[in-house]
Image (cartoon, rainbow, N blue to C red):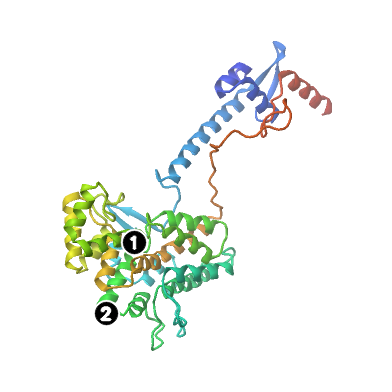
Amino acid sequence: MRNWITLAEAARQLGVQAQTVYAYASRGNIAVMPDPHDPRKSLYRADDVARLCRKKQVGRKREALAAGTIFGAEPCIYSGITTFSKGRPYYRGRDSIALADHATLEDVATLLWHARAPVTFPFEADDAAPEGETRGRQCAFTSLAALAANGHSTLGRTDAALHVEAGQLVAAVARAFGASASSNGDDAMPVHARLALGWNQDAHGAELIRKALVLVADHEITSSAFAARITASTGASLPGCLLTGLATLSGPLHGDASGRVRAVFDDVNRLGADQVVTHHLQSAIPVPGFGHHLYPDGDPRAAALLDALEPPAELAAFIAKVVKLTGLKPTIDVALATLAAQLNLPRDAAFALFATARCVGLLAHCIEQLRVGKVIRPRGRYTGPPLEEEAGPSAPRRGKVAAPDEKTLQKNRLFKVAGS
């Protein structure tokens, strides 16, 4: 009779009280039969109890995994976009550091979006800023917000249609940060050349901008990519998805980390490299932009970009001194801030480069998430105050169902037999 077990054994296996076993039985989760040796007692199907035990164990594992994955313990989203190997990021299997030697951001978009046709970021000839309009971060976010307010859902649309709109969005962000349309109507001008034109840079400056854009186009499941994917999973418009991602990117612990580096560079230019480094080390204040948890041997994106730069002498001395005294290598945030300083770009240019390029990666994640077809919905673990009780001294707590006793179960079984 091991197919059926006693109440005490079922409670022991499940690790619960007898009342909980009664509740499982009343909901049909555990089959019940009268004990042939004692009609006052019941037996419970062993297979049902074992199934519930397995379910509880899986639930615990999932809960622990979910808590860990949300806070960075393990990756929890399958993606074919970007990964890391031997300390280098790869875009769909291609070495992104090697791609930065020759590819444009348009080439990277074609690769990351899995597009069948070459991707373009269309600029119109009349895209010049209206009189008195200030280009920059506010313009970029305002433009996206306006597009999101009237955007179309991504549901039921082909990848090709989404790629066209995505290209338009990248162009809109680039224009907001100062990219200019070609004066001769050259629609084929890549976005790095348009940014260089808007920032009054020569061909060498344009080449450095191109390299920087490719290096930061994507970086796997970052917080901004995760935020954009959550929005995309609801079927929201592409502008809405991109706005979510860029809003997350704008935090100083993410895409705007170059702003903290820029503030230190201001101190270096004012006080000198030695005094700034000494101040940070004596005050036990970490120097922003040095050391990356994913790259213990150094950020290869930063190394690739810094190798192509000739920064002002004082900034170069500062970077070298920090590396020597701390052992920490510069991150891409230092490289972007150094590029902006060398080319004398607008004050927010480092973030502008990061945001414009990362639009490509964020949109790739949005389009990929759409094909999953499920809404991302984490569960919360309530840690607040106890719930209020219903009116009346004997009322059970809200949300709890009183478990039936053995006599009630017996009556229910008799009722079912009579009713059948």
Image quadrant of residue 351?
A: bottom left
- Is residue 371 something one can see in this rendering? no
The answer to which of 193 and 200 lies nearer the viewer is: 200
Q: Is residue 407 visible?
A: yes
Place of residue 192 in the rendered image (x, y in percent of width and height, measured from the top left): 34, 74
| Residue 188, disc | none
The correct choice, above or below, for 216 with respect to 63 in the image is below
Residue 217, position in %: x, y? Answer: 37, 64
Which amino acid, by three-letter code, is at mark 1? Gly
Which part of the image, by quadrant, shows the N terminus?
top right
Q: Nearer the viewer, mark 1 or mark 2?
A: 1
Above or below, 204 relative to 233: below
Q: Residue at x 41, y 60 (%)?
A: 250
Q: Residue furthest right?
A: 418
Q: Which residue is mark 2?
A: 203
The residue beneath circle 1 is 259
Quadrant of res 123: bottom left
Q: Between residues 334 and 221, which one lies in front from this camera angle?
A: 334
Q: Closer to the camera, 292 or 290?
A: 290
- Secondary-structure class at tag 1: helix
Q: Is residue 236 left or right of residue 43?
A: left
Residue type at mark 2 is Ala
Which image quadrant for residue 207? bottom left
Q: Quadrant of the C terminus?
A: top right
Residue positioned most to the top = 37
User: In x, y percent, where is residue 81?
Assistant: 41, 59
Q: Residue at x 49, y 73 (%)?
A: 164
